Image (cartoon, rainbow, N blue to C red):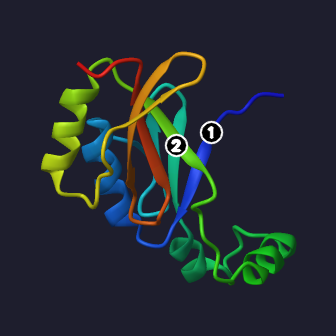
């Protein structure tokens, strides 16, 4: 078995897509307009628009098991129990670039040295998922 994709179930699809386009500096592959996009950034990171399915749930494209499961999941679901870790060669430059995008609050540069030097900062996406941008040095 292999992990082929990690995807975010977004509450604000357009805002999330724009956020990741700016942070990753790439355009996503669009597989279904306003429902699903994939960013090729080392691994696949995708964004799924649940509201798209909500509008078509009685369509013939969904079986009874999917509809039952979909309706069951209408809870206060939050995605922020996972951290997306991205590596960059130049953390200082990336930190400045992300701050200048004004996408939200950016943490200070943090440093940990347990096994080896590790520098990183965090920013949250529009759905509250944490992105950790890291490097082995901060020069």
Label count reads: 2
**Pointer 1: residues within 10 angstroms few (<14), some, or many (20+)?**
few
Q: CA distance from mark 2 to mark 1?
A: 13 Å
| For residue 116, above or below residue 16 | above
Where is residue 23 drawn, in percent x and y? 29, 43
Residue highlighted by disc 1: 5
Q: Residue at x 59, y 23 (%)?
A: 114
Q: Quadrant of the N terminus?
A: top right
**Tags 2 and 1 touching, CB below 8 Å:** no
Task: Give the mark toward the camera: 2 or 1.
Answer: 2
Q: Is residue 54 left or right of residue 136?
A: right
Secondary structure of the residue carrying tag 2 is strand
Q: Quadrant of residue 96?
A: top left
Q: Residue at x 29, y 22 (%)?
A: 138
**Up-down: is 88 above or below 104?**
above
Residue 15, numbered circle: none
Q: Position of residue 50 (x, y in %)?
A: 56, 71
What is the x, y in percent for residue 56?
59, 78
Looking at this rendering, what residue extends furthest in the left direction?
100
Residue 21 image-quadrant placement: top left
Residue 25: give x, y in percent of width and height: 26, 36
For residue 9, side relative to residue 95 (left or right): right
Badge 2: residue crowd in 10 Å (few <14, some 14–19, many ≥20): some
Residue at point 19%, 48% (across, down): 99
Say which quadrant the C terminus sits in: top left
Q: Is residue 123 left or right of residue 94?
A: right
Badge 2 or badge 1: first in the primary sequence: 1
The one nearer the camera, 42 or 69, is: 42
- Residue carrying label 2: 84
């Amino acid at each position: 078995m292999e992990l082929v994709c990690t995807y975010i179930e977004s509450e604000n699809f357009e805002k999330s897509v724009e956020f990741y386009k700016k942070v990753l500096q790439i355009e996503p592959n669009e597989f279904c307009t306003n429902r699903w996009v994939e960013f090729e950034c080392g691994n696949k990171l995708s964004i799924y628009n649940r509201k798209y399915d909500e509008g078509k749930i009685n369509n013939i494209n969904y079986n009874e098991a999917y509809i039952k499961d979909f309706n069951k999941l209408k809870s206060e679901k939050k995605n922020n129990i996972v951290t997306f870790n991205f590596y960059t060669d130049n953390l200082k430059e990336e930190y400045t670039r992300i701050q200048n995008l004004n996408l939200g609050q950016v943490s200070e540069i943090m440093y940990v040295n347990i096994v080896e030097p590790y520098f990183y900062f965090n920013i949250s996406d529009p759905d509250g998922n944490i992105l950790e941008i890291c490097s082995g040095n901060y020069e």
